[in-house]
Amino acid sequence: MFSREEIIEILNKPAEEIFTLADKIRQEQVGNEVHLRGLIEFSNICKRQCKYCGLRCENKGISRYRMTPDEIILCARNAAEAGYKTVVLQSGEDEYYSRDILCKIISEIKKLNIAVTLSVGEKSFEDYQAYRESGADRYLLRIETTDRNLYQRMHPGADINNRIRCLENLRELGYEVGTGCLVGLPGQTLESLADDILFFKEINADMIGIGPLIPHPDTPLKNCNAGSLKIALKVIAITRIMLGNINIPATTAMETLDPDGRMLALKSGANVIMPNVTPVIYKDKYEIYPNKISFSENASQSRQFVEEILKKAGRSIANDYGFRKR
Ligand code: 5AD
């Protein structure tokens, strides 16, 4: 296990061996199978003002949409028929989807015998409890950064303590809990990235999503540099080494930054891919950052495409639900 100082040192210097070690541990702990999660981006309406995100409420430059519950359920059905064992329901923090509406969507989708992951932001304990009782299995809520000052600068009006409260509630309710961070926020230090990794370990996260910042032209971070792919890969690798059997996606942001990014992530500790299965009429509008990569127009084409690239890398698509291997 690495100490804080050792993590900082690895992040600071060329350290190719870390990728080899992470790949080996990934193979020992979770094998060569890659889990696919079909991502449904069901609303780009958001009440928050995260400085880096294109969905922030102050961005008037995107056209906003909400999928109806029926559209969401149909989209999940298509994904299930294409062989996905998990769908991820993600949106901005959009209050239109009340507890009741979301619970109905979840319980309908659960009838398809697939796992449901939610990624809809900070909610109350009671909301999380109701979603769980309706059948939600997992929840993604990145901490984004554990540096309290940076957190505050990046998230006007938000409170990191509430985010931590959410992660604790989710754990208590028996969700598989996913968190993660952005790499390359302005003013972020390698020390704080080391603290992020130690935080993942401390809360014993089941899933960790890591991606480089990609500046969005219609946000306050438009003139910032993009995050470093190399450092993001190192954060993935160290996280794999330190947390062992968790699930780690090769995120879309990695590939958006570099055509090889997703494959590099899969060789540096990642074991999950989240193909976008959002209907084409909405997909382009979910612009968290510009030029977001997506494999294909529909769920089953995406799956075939992914299968082909995985084969070349000696990996295969898993057929189980892809819960954390314990
Ligand atoms: N670049 C990269 N990732 C971003 N996210 C939000 N905005 C950006 C951006 N500009 C990430 C956040 C969020 C996830 C859904 O997308 O980390 O948790």
Image (cartoon, rainbow, N blue to C red):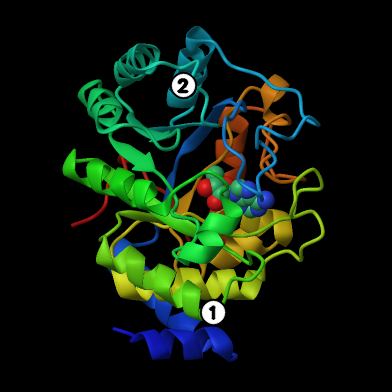
Mark 2 element type: helix
- The three-letter amino acid code for the residue at tag 1 is Leu
- The residue identified by callout 2 is 76
Reply above or below: 76 against 84. Answer: above
Q: Between marks 2 and 1, how big is the CA–CA gap?
A: 39 Å
Q: How crowded is mark 1: few (under 14 residues within 10 Å), some or many (20 or more)?
A: some
Q: Which percent across, then down, holds residue 277? A: 57, 30
Relative to 247, 152 lies left or right: right
Q: Mark 1 points at which residue?
A: 190
Callout 1: helix, strand or loop?
helix
Quarter that holds the C terminus: bottom left
Q: Name the residue: 31% across, 59% down.
A: 246
Left or right side of 243 for 219: right
Q: In which quarter of the image is residue 232?
A: bottom right
Residue 283, can we see it?
yes
28 to the left or right of 38: left
